[in-house]
Amino acid sequence: MDDQKIKVKAESGQILEVGVSSKKTEAIWIILGEGVHNAKCKLTPTRNSLAYAGSVLGRELIYERSVEQVRADIAQEEHDSYQFRTR
């Protein structure tokens, strides 16, 4: 997951590009900011599993991809990394 970035929507409607620390179907850990002035946030699936939501510094963030889409993304990343290693 090195240098992977995703776009999340803030409650104000602003789109932010954030770094991904860890990505699993049950939670996505993201990092806002860089260097010593960063903040880590845990995004968890919403009740209907159509998005991931979390809060950092009093702001709500939404990642508008479903659990199924994230599961497919993870499977594709694992497949790609496996293909890369076997060549």
Image (spheres, grey):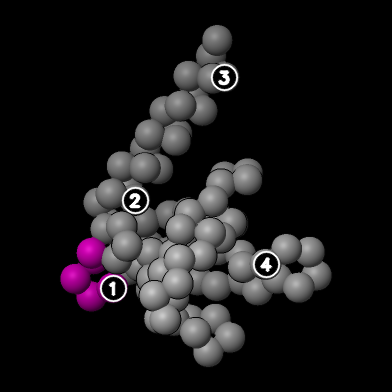
Q: CA distance from mark 1 to mark 4?
A: 24 Å
The three-letter amino acid code for the residue at tag 2 is Val
Task: State which mark lies toward you, 4 or 2.
Answer: 4
Q: Earlier in the sequence, mark 2 or mark 1?
A: 1
Q: Which residue sits at x=38%, y=34%?
A: 76
Mark 2 falls on what kind of element?
helix
| Vertical comparison of 75 with 4: above or below | above
Which residue in the rendered view is the most extreme toward the bottom? 58
* 75 over 71 or under it: above or below: above
Q: Which mark is residue 70?
A: 2
Q: Amino acid at mark 3?
A: Arg
Point out the stretch of residues depicted in magenta.
Answer: 46-50
Of callouts 4 and 2, the N-terminal one: 4
| Element on which disc 4 rests | loop
Nearer to us: label 4 or label 3 = 4
Q: CA distance from mark 1 to mark 3?
A: 35 Å
